[in-house]
Image (cartoon, helix red, strand yellow):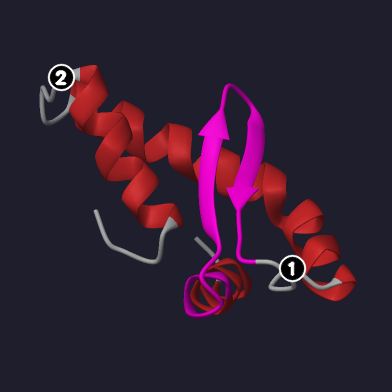
Amino acid sequence: MTKKDRDLLERLHNDGVILTVDGNRLKYKAPVGAVTPELRAAMIERSPDLVYEYHERAGILIYDARMPKDQAEARAANTLRGGTV
């Protein structure tokens, strides 16, 4: 994950924005007014990298850590919420 990705995730987390992944789409829930046009553009720009990061982390947890898929996906999603795996 790049510094640009981490900075964006930190800003989203601080603004109360919750990211999720649905297939290959990045989705979000946010308080009213939290997602400015500038922030939305940044999310669109970084979306492919963030979705890739989610799937990569979930895959590693499933195959290397032998974690059940639902638990691995929950841990990977935590990354998008400003947490760590």
Q: Is residue 74 above or below residue 23?
A: below
Specify the amino acid type for callout 1: Val
Mark in the foreground, 2 or 1: 1
- The image position of residue 3, as x and y in percent, is 55, 75
Q: In this view, does 20 lie above or below 65?
A: below
Separation (CA) of disc 2 from disc 1: 33 Å
**Residue at the far front in the pictured view:** 32
Mark 2, secondary structure of its residue: loop
- The image position of residue 61, as x and y in percent, is 22, 33
Mark 1, secondary structure of its residue: loop
Report the disc number at residue 68: 2
Q: Nearer the viewer, residue 82 or 65?
A: 82
| Count of marks placed on residues | 2
Quarter of the rendering containing residue 22: top right
Quarter of the rendering containing residue 76: top left
Q: In this view, does 77 lie above or below 67?
A: below
Determine crowd level at label 2: few under 14, some 14-19, many 20+ residues with C-alpha closer than 10 A: few
- The image position of residue 64, as x and y in percent, is 16, 28
Q: Is residue 56 above or below residue 4?
A: above
34 left or right, relative to 23 = right
Q: Which residue is drawn at 58% across and 66% down?
A: 5
Q: Nearer the viewer, residue 36 or 58?
A: 36
Question: The magenta stretch spans which residues?
Answer: 12-31
Specify the amino acid type for callout 2: Pro
- Give the mark nearer the N terminus: 2 vs 1: 1
- List the residue tagged with mark 1: 35
Q: Which of 80 and 62 is in front in this view?
A: 80
